[in-house]
Amino acid sequence: MFSGRMTLYGQLEDLQDLAFIERPIRRSLKSAEEIDQLTVDEDLNDIERAVYLLSFGQEVQRVSVISNLPSLVRQNPAETFRRVVPKVREVLNGAGAEIQLAAAASFLTILQDDIILIHTHTYSILKTVLLHLNHRDTVVSNAWLETLLSAIGALPKETIKQEVLNPLLYQSQLSHSLQARLASCRILGKIASKFDSHIVKKELLPLAHSLCQDVEFEVRASMCRQLENIARATGAEDTRTELLPELVELAGDEESSVRLAAFDTIINLMEMIDSDDRLHVVVPLVMSVCDSSSQADEAVMASLSFQFGKLCSGLADSLSDEQRTRLLQKFKLFSVSGLQTEGNHTETSSESTLIRCNCCYNLPAMVVFADSAHFLSEVYPSFASLCCDPEVSVRRSAAASFHQVVKLLGSNPQLVHKELLSLLQDDALEVLDALMNHLEETLEAVLSRGENTSVDNKFPELLSALLLAEQTVGCSLRWRLHEKLLQRYSCLARLLPGDILHQSFSPRIFIILTTNKVLPVQKEAARTFCTFLRYNRKQEQRQEMMERLIQDLAQGRSYWNRLRFLDVCETATEIFSRKYFNKHFLIPALELVHDPVANVRYKLCQLLPRLRSSLRLPSDKQLLQQLDFCVQKLLCREKDKDVVATIRKTVLELDKLELTEPFQKRQEKDLLDQKKEKEETLLLEMLERQQTEAKTNDKLNERKRRDSKTSLSATKSMSVSSSGATLTSSGKEMRKAKLSRSRSLSSQPTTSKSTNSDRPLKVKDLSSSSGSGKSSMILSKDDSLRTAHFTMATLSQTPSTSSMPVLIRSNTTSLLERTSTSDHRTSTSDHRSSTLDHRSSTLDHRTSTLDHRTGTLDHRTGTLDHRTSTLDHRTSTLDHRSKTIDQRSSGGKDSQSRKLSINRKSNSFSVQSGRD
């Protein structure tokens, strides 16, 4: 039963809805009479239409005309000021706040944009502004005041003096309203810069003194803030005598706003106050203000904390050590304002948070004030507290000032390394955003201190923090922050070592390039990756990065990756030189003309003009032919209508490319490309130099390892060298014995003796010559011996004649000469034998001194043993040959003696027969 009632109730509601739909609907929100009133003749021009609407239109139409007044002034200023502006004045009389605000904004726009000639039409605007300056509505009055202050900057001095200054003297009296006196203070500060110091001192300064003594504290505070402009107009001397006492008096006012205004003005005028006044007037005033400010008056502390850095910097030369310590202690109190715990509860408020933010703003000034040498003891506790503040706004302010603090620390950036890691790992993206604004300067100050080992040891922590910050931002939806972060990370290419960059950051940037779905982030990742590629100093890593681009993007399975490769090519044309781009990027990009996906071909068509601009004839003739082939294929075989339309448009752009580009712009591009190519050439030279140095270092290390091995085998080398020396000495003794035997043989005047005398010489020469030389010399010596034996045999077989004694006599003489020559050769052989002994001793000395070349000496010692044994063998062979020759020579001698005796007998017989 209950469910039935609910169903009936629902049906009744549906019927009521249908009844509402069937009601007559009003077709228009305006009646016919209202439409007639809003209708304007279409034949009227803009000026006539504006005049008509201001005269007879409704309020909304008048507001529209007044808001459009700057456009009318731009189109026709003369007619607008002659016909429209007077109507605007009529409308403003008794108009509501909406029309008043629209008119004030329009006149302010006209004055600020310099739409009109100031001296011609500003006077008419000024009359309107002054007429409505004292409007009863505060908002409207302030709007007209802003218009007046803007007009004062464009008005001449005489006009200001007559139309502004005289009413100002009247409005500043106590009889006028508070709003009028506050406006007088602002006008007084504005017109002070228009007059010289004499007029300011004579006419404006008395008026300023009277307003400083006004009964309302708002007026005193407002006039106190305008004293800075009056002081700069009067000069330093009048400021010291006239305005500084007034400011000191206002600094002791009963109202805190007046005291703060006076205190801020004194700080702003610090450069105009001499050292004596700083020491005797300003410093005691500052100390009293710092001592009087307390937690109870947080507004005073907020204003003081904002000016604290400027105050300390201005008074640094006038403070004693005790006063300096007090100011630093005050800054420490400001940095923990609102964080004092009562039990486990921390009380924070907007004012205390503002004070700590102001401390972050003043951190660089306080580092300079305390001196970087005392940073750790004076400023670091406050700095660390602000970087770990519980409020996000405070940490954001600390991150915004971090780069200045790091640069002021100079060669000690490791002092704030912990805070940098804390800010990089912050969970609040606002903190990371503030840190990213100047991350390049921060990292340059931190990472450029390569000589500081403490910074080098903290590289891994910093790199992990940078990668974690990127992951934190990448997981969020704030892609603009992610784009900014990748843009800042490009500076790591010149700050980090190539190996670390290649191992840690390049893979992560490549993953972002291939997986992120936000196009601006992808393009920034492509730019950062290309920057890493350009400044990488190892050829293997550069080749690996380039191959990964080609394989994973240009030849990737996903068309999305192939589109990303074209984006990389577009970025590469800006980063790399034309030569490098044409060598590595152009061909893979042109090969995408065969891509099966129309979107890739469409993107390639859009990129073709940029690719064509990278080619220069005649060096790139073949590449230009390939590009033309790509265009022809797209024109002939393309079926997708969007690609066809794009390639046709691209062909027209390619035809106009050389004609439309100005010569100066092309020349600038060529110069920039030459600069890039030069930088790349220098990088390649650095790569080659590094590779050469690496090879040299490897050789040195290998030599050191060999030296260490040879030092272990020094005893063995010494024993081997001594055995080699013993064998050498025994060989020398054997050679000396053979030489003595040859000398004994050379004492007889025979050919065989001379031959034998030459034999030891040849043996000694063999020991110092090559194997081939030895064999050739032995063969030549054997031939000479054979010739001598053949000559002796011929002589023995020749019959006796009358000329035979002459022949025998000549042969004997030659034999005697050969015997003397053999004696000379024997002496020469003795000299060479002594030389060989000296060389052997030298070899022994070298063998004993060059222990580090033990392996080589072992080989040489073995060779020497082999040569010594060979020499002994050859010596024994020579001994055998010497015996044989001795036997033959003895036989020849007997035959010769018989022949001589026969010849003598025959000669004596012939002589005797002649006598008979």
Image (tube, grey):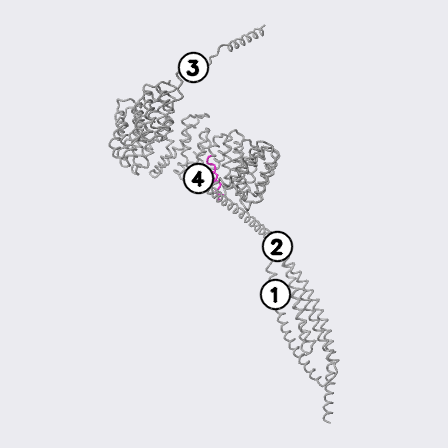
Which badge, 1 or 2, is on the more N-terminal residue? 2
Asked if disc 3 and disc 1 are in contact, CB closer than 8 Å, the reply is no
Residue 219, horizontal then vertical, whole percent: 30, 25
Query: The disc labelled 2 sits on which kind of residue?
Result: Thr
Query: The N terminus appears in which quarter of the rendering?
Result: top right
| Residue at the disc numbered 3 | 30
Say which of marks 3 and 2 sits in front.
Answer: 3
Disc nearer the start of the sequence (4/2): 4
Q: Please give the label number shown on residue 407.
A: 4
- The C terminus lies in which quarter of the figure? bottom right
In terms of sequence position, does the residue under pointer 3 or pointer 2 come before the other? 3
Which quadrant would residue 910 be assigned to in this image?
Answer: bottom right
How far is disc 4 from disc 3 in space, using C-alphas? 68 Å
Of all residues, the one furthest to the bottom in this rendering is: 916
Q: Is residue 455 magenta?
A: no
Is 24 rendered above or below residue 215?
above
Contact between labelled residues 2 and 1, with CB atoms less than 8 Å apart: no
Q: Earlier in the sequence, mark 4 or mark 3?
A: 3
In the image, the segment drawn in magenta is 437-452
Estimate how packed mark 1 is, as few (under 14), some (14 to 19) or many (20 or more) residues with alpha carbons within 10 Å.
some
Query: Which one is closest to the eye, mark 3 or mark 1?
Result: 3
Q: Position of residue 610 (x, y in %)?
A: 53, 39
Q: Could you classify mark 2 by the number of other residues whose Cα lies within 10 Å: few (under 14), some (14-19), or many (20 or more)?
A: some
* Type of amino acid at the residue the image marks with label 4: Lys
Q: Spatial distance from mark 3 to mark 2, Cα to Cα?
A: 112 Å
Which residue is at the front of the view, 514 or 63? 63
The circle on residue 710 is 2
N-terminal of the two: label 1 or label 4? 4
Location of mark 1 (residue): 841
Q: Alpha carbon of mark 1 to alpha carbon of mark 2: how far? A: 24 Å
